[in-house]
């Protein structure tokens, strides 16, 4: 089977791009290095995607996968290692095969940022986690801390309390949370123990996490809290390796620069979703995917309606 368009990344942007591209008459393949869904599938619940008042991220992503599979071929567990410009378009080399296509849409998203604190690497999987939905269950009736002050951190803290963690600390480095006010209020109502102006100096324990050494950023005093688990939720960084290979223009934070039609500076390469930065919501990722999926028709000699 030959394809005209390769989409890299099967998250909301990739699925949406696939649906729109195939419906525009483009032979499309989607690659994902894992099982798809992206970071959205790790969200305990999503309450701001229109049409779904409250839905677990994994469930919403499963629905998108099923929908996109009706249209595009999707190869899971097939990581794209290299993309090179060719006379005809692009050669896309995955861990299994080489594909020649005319256009590429990068929907490679972001990955979890690391705290870079002593003990973080050592105790990964032994109390340190980057995903409350995945690992929270193991900490029911135990004490946990979530590090970060954004929406994700607050949602994870609420989720951990909800599934029965005995004590949940939310530890943030500044004097106010970055998260939406409504979420902060919910966290306070649910008796999340919010510690502000605190930096994690060390994640400590013997075989597994036992305590966090904290330093106050105002009075510089140090303190310890006893926890069994620590969930690090301090944002994401762009997965831009393929973009760098193609010499695609990135902004100062490493996100791909696109125009309103999701075009990059390389003709035939488009980008959509979290990899383009901005407010990084599921709804914006889907919208960008849709635009990229339609716009890609312009390099295929197909009708480009806008
Ligand atoms: P985020 O909004 O970028 O927040 C990251 C948090 O981690 C910030 O509070 C930041 O502190 C802190 N942080 C960063 N580096 C740190 C370090 N080295 N040490 C300690 N703390 C550190 O990330 P996010 O919460 O993952 O959200 C990502 C995007 O998805 C955002 O646009 C967010 O709005 C969106 N999102 C939306 C929802 C929703 O339901 N609407 C849910 C989840 C995510 P500072 O505040 O001091 O910078």
Image (cartoon, rainbow, N blue to C red):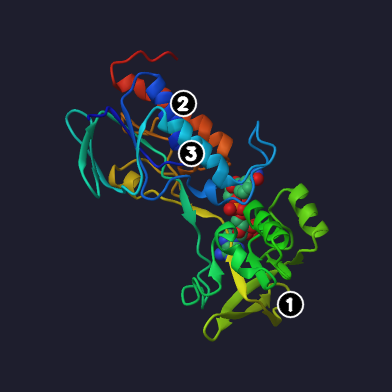
Q: Which residue is mark 2?
A: 291
Structural distance between the alpha carbons of marks 3 and 2? 11 Å
Q: In the drawing, does residue 65 fall left or right of residue 225?
A: left
Give the image location of residue 133, x and y in percent. 59, 57
Reading the chain from its start, which is encountered first: label 2 or label 1?
1
Q: Residue at label 3?
A: 273
**Relative to 205, residue 33 above or below:** above
Q: Residue at x 60, y 70 (%)?
A: 230
Asked which secondary structure carries label 2, the reply is: helix
- Disc 2 from disc 1: Cα separation: 50 Å
Q: Quick check: 136 left or right of 72?
A: right
Task: Calculate the distance from the C-alpha at mark 1 to the C-alpha at mark 3.
Answer: 41 Å
User: Where 171 sits versus 240, above or below?
Assistant: below
Mark 2 vs ligand 1: CB below 8 Å: no
Q: Nearer the viewer, residue 199 or 194?
A: 194
Q: Please name the residue that numbered disc 1 is placed on.
A: 219
Question: Where is residue 114 drawn, in percent x and y?
Answer: 50, 64
Label 3 secondary element: loop
Could you tell me which quadrant the N terminus lies in? top left
Pick whichever of labels 3 and 2 is earlier in the sequence.
Answer: 3
How many residues crowd around disc 1 within 10 Å: few (fewer than 14), some, or many (20 or more)? few
């Amino acid at each position: 089977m030959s394809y005209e368009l390769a989409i890299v990344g099967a998250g909301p942007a990739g699925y949406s791009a696939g649906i729109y591209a195939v419906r525009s008459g483009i032979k499309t393949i989607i690659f994902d290095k894992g099982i798809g869904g992206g970071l959205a599938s790790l969200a305990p619940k999503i309450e701001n995607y229109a049409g779904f008042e409250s839905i677990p991220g994994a469930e919403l992503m499963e629905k998108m996968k099923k929908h996109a599979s009706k249209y595009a071929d999707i190869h899971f567990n097939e990581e794209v290692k290299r993309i090179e410009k060719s006379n005809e378009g692009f050669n896309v080399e995955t861990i299994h095969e080489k594909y020649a296509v005319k256009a590429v849409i990068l929907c490679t998203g972001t990955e979890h940022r690391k705290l870079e604190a002593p003990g973080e690497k050592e105790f990964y999987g032994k109390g340190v986690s980057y995903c409350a939905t995945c690992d929270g269950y193991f900490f029911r009736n135990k004490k946990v801390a979530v590090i970060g002050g954004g929406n994700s951190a607050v949602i994870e803290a609420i989720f951990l309390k909800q599934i029965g963690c005995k004590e949940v600390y939310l530890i943030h480095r500044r004097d106010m949370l970055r998260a939406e006010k409504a979420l902060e209020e919910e966290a306070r109502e649910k008796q999340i123990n919010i510690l502000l102006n605190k930096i994690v100096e060390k994640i400590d324990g013997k075989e597994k996490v036992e305590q966090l050494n904290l330093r106050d950023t105002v009075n510089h005093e140090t303190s310890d809290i006893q926890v069994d688990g620590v969930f690090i939720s301090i944002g994401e960084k762009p997965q831009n390796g393929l973009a760098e290979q193609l010499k695609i223009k990135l902004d100062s934070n490493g996100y791909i620069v696109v125009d309103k039609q999701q075009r990059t500076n390389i003709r035939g390469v488009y980008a959509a979703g979290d990899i383009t930065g901005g407010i990084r919501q599921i709804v914006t990722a889907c919208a960008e995917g849709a635009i990229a999926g339609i716009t890609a028709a312009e390099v295929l000699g197909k009708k480009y309606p806008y």
